[in-house]
Image (cartoon, rainbow, N blue to C red):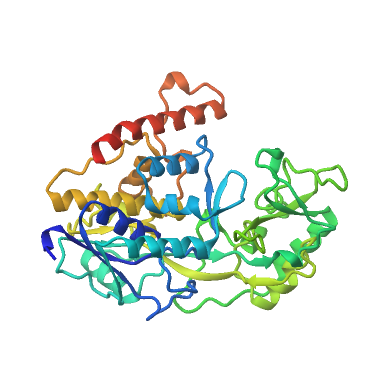
Amino acid sequence: MSRRLSAAIVGAGLAGTEAALVLASKGIAVHLFEMRPLRMTPAHTTDLPAELVCSNSFKSQDTHTAHGVLKAELLYLQSPLLLAARRSSVAAGSALAVDRLKFSRLAAELLADQAGIQFIRREITVPPEAYGVCIIAAGPLVSDALVEWLGHECSAAALHFYDAIAPIVSFDSVNPEIAFFGSRYGHEGADYCNCPFTEAEYRAFYEALREADRTVARAFENERFFEACLPVEVLAEREYRALAFGPLKPMGLINPRTGRRPFAVCQLRRENEAGTAYNLVGFQTRLTIPEQRRVFRLIPGLEKAEFLRYGSIHRNTYLDSPRLLAPDLSLRAVPEIFIAGQLCGSEGYTESVATGHLAALSALARLTGTAFVPPPRESALGSLLHHVTGSLNTPFTPSNIHFGLFPALPDNAKRIRKKANRELLCERALQSITEWSKMVR
């Protein structure tokens, strides 16, 4: 193997798997390192690559949303994992949700079918040096040893936040006399199963949730949570109607049995292709398992819910990336090393795939002696990359893709209504990525 045209990738999650597949498709010899199953994490349950540990949804595919535009850009670049997600999708309205096991098995097949990739089961504590480049995509549950190396080499401490996982219930345990299928405003068919609350039922659930026992944080854990993924009980602490205006919002839903909008609604989203398992949308939690059984069975329709997976909480680690990374995702202190995935502060499944893809293109440019041309700022990819490598926010926090990351439209377009403004942002993004992609293919 020629060092000049070789790459080591640490971590076979979404970012690492995407990077490996992209680099190998360009003729680069890749060694992909993964510590599972030799060493498991608190969140993973298999040794498969690209395992989805929190939700099975990659979020919206609507190209008039920020998430949808990011997917469209990646699909335009022929992203291997986004194509795999489509091949393993389950019904979820306008969202791209997948059968997790099918998706990960498909990712494993893609890696095995690519002759240029050697998949090595080994924990990496220090980046290997016998390669032209190294991409660290070890994910938010990166090993302590590798975190220590990063902190030492970069002269900056790793930062931490804590993410929570939503429960999954068996669909045959959902009460069909209470729950009903439908989507908000009817725009997405009838893919979601809805559990409607009266105000009295909501109040009982709210009070039980606030009083429920929670898992005790270990010594190294603190109370910092990612704002877009708050545990449901933390959100409930803010005010009485916080849940009804958040994950339990009833807007656009009519209960067919009453002909009226419920006071609140818990939505269940299909978890697998067979439709035998559904997850509680927005119900990330740190409640103890006995309390999850007690409190979540107060949700109308889930009185006899069979839990296939309970919610849990785990440590997520990310770097102060804008201070540590160059615009091409390489470490300023160690330029032959690139950072991708949630470790660099790209929060979300599609976002991890995106930074893995961009890190591969950056590494390829370094290996071949060409200049890396970043995606335009107007694109979703460019906006995400700019946040990760150029955010001025202090302290830096991870982010999903959202319209706040996109550069503003010209002044003459700012007075149009919000929906039209966002449509223009999306159209501009897709147009810009079309031109840029011609230079990187």
- Please state if 419 lies on the left or on the right of 31 as rendered: right
Q: Residue furthest right?
A: 258
Relative to 316, say whether 24 is above or below: above
- Please state if 312 lies on the left or on the right of 429 as rendered: right
Relative to 439, say whether 388 is above or below: below
Report if residue 391 is visible in the image: no
In-front residue for pair 206/427: 427
Residue 1 occupies which quadrant of the picture? bottom left
Q: Position of residue 327 (x, y in %)?
A: 25, 47
Q: Residue furthest top?
A: 412
Query: Measuring 62% from the left and 57% from the top, which residue is drawn there?
Result: 282
Report if residue 19 is visible in the image: yes
Residue 11 occupies which quadrant of the picture? bottom left
Q: Position of residue 217 (x, y in %)?
A: 53, 76
Query: Measuring 42% from the left and 30% from the top, which residue is drawn there?
Result: 408
Q: Position of residue 317 (x, y in %)?
A: 40, 65
Query: Measuring 23% from the left and 51% from the top, which residue is drawn there?
Result: 26
Number of callouts in the render?
0
Residue 288 occupies which quadrant of the picture? bottom right
Q: Position of residue 71 (x, y in %)?
A: 45, 44
- Please state if 131 lies on the left or on the right of 124 as rendered: left
- Please state if 280 lies on the left or on the right of 40 as rendered: right
* Quarter the C terminus occupies: top left
In-front residue for pair 310/46: 46
